[in-house]
Amino acid sequence: MNQKVAKNVSSIIFDLGGVLFDIDYSLTQKAFIALGAKDFDQLYSQQKQEGFFDDFERGNITAAHFRTEVKKLLPGHLTDDDVNKAWNALLIGFPAKKVEFMKQLKKRYPLYLLSNTNDIHLPAVLEMMDAEYGKGIMQQMFHKEYYSCRMGMRKPNADIYKVVCDENDLNPANTVFIDDSIQNVVGAGEFGLQTLHFTPNVTSLEEFFN
């Protein structure tokens, strides 16, 4: 797999969590285990999600429904805020150096965001971004943002890549997709996009463009 942006690339689609916005799945797993959940890491991880977790990312169930389902996995009485805090524990932040890099990169390429997310994580992320960098920061970095929970579909299914390409007249052969989850990279490649896998060995986004 080529780990450099090819010269024929005319547009870029970025994943959010794990590529641009720092996250740590283990923090949410530990938070729910601390609340009494058993085998939570088997239900929810970067590699897979079961049942209602997947439905939540597709926007097929509401945040209220999701919290109700999560509470069934937990002993005792928990508030909605308890669930939200544990669920959002994985959210670390968007490093300032990446914000500046994206602003500069946008001068060279049309940039798009394609994220598997949900109606609890997404508001929290946007609130964190606005608080740290000012309202409108996402629009300063991307030409358009796509979130699975607002689309009724999620990566790695081909339909979500097709929507982004069709709506923006992108030629997949000249568009590169960057994600940290291998299943999403594989799905994008099968759809016809160029791909780059943001692995733990990648120390900075600049590596892809040098």
Image (cartoon, rainbow, N blue to C red):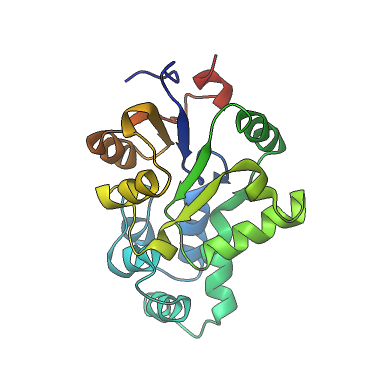
Q: Is residue 42 left or right of residue 128?
A: left
Q: Tell me where residue 104 appears, x and y as whole percent.
A: 67, 29
Q: Is residue 204 visible?
A: no
Q: Tell me where residue 171 appears, x and y as whole percent.
A: 35, 34
Front-lying residue, 208 or 135:
135
Up-down relation of residue 156 to residue 32 (above or below): above
> Could you say which quadrant of the image residue 55 lies in?
bottom left
Q: Residue at x 46, y 64 (%)?
A: 118
Q: Quadrant of the C terminus?
A: top right
Q: Residue at x 56, y 44 (%)?
A: 143
Up-down relation of residue 174 to residue 94 (above or below): above
Q: Is residue 136 left or right of residue 189?
A: right
> Could you say which quadrant of the image residue 75 lies in?
bottom left
Q: Tell me where residue 122 appears, x and y as whole percent.
A: 54, 61
Q: Quadrant of the N terminus?
A: top left
Q: Residue furthest front?
A: 169
Q: Is residue 209 left or right of residue 52?
A: right
> Could you tell me how many numbered marks the image carries?
0
Q: Residue furthest left?
A: 190
Up-down relation of residue 202 to residue 179 (above or below): above
Front-lying residue, 140 or 86:
140
Q: Is residue 128 visible?
A: yes
Q: Residue at x 53, y 53 (%)?
A: 27
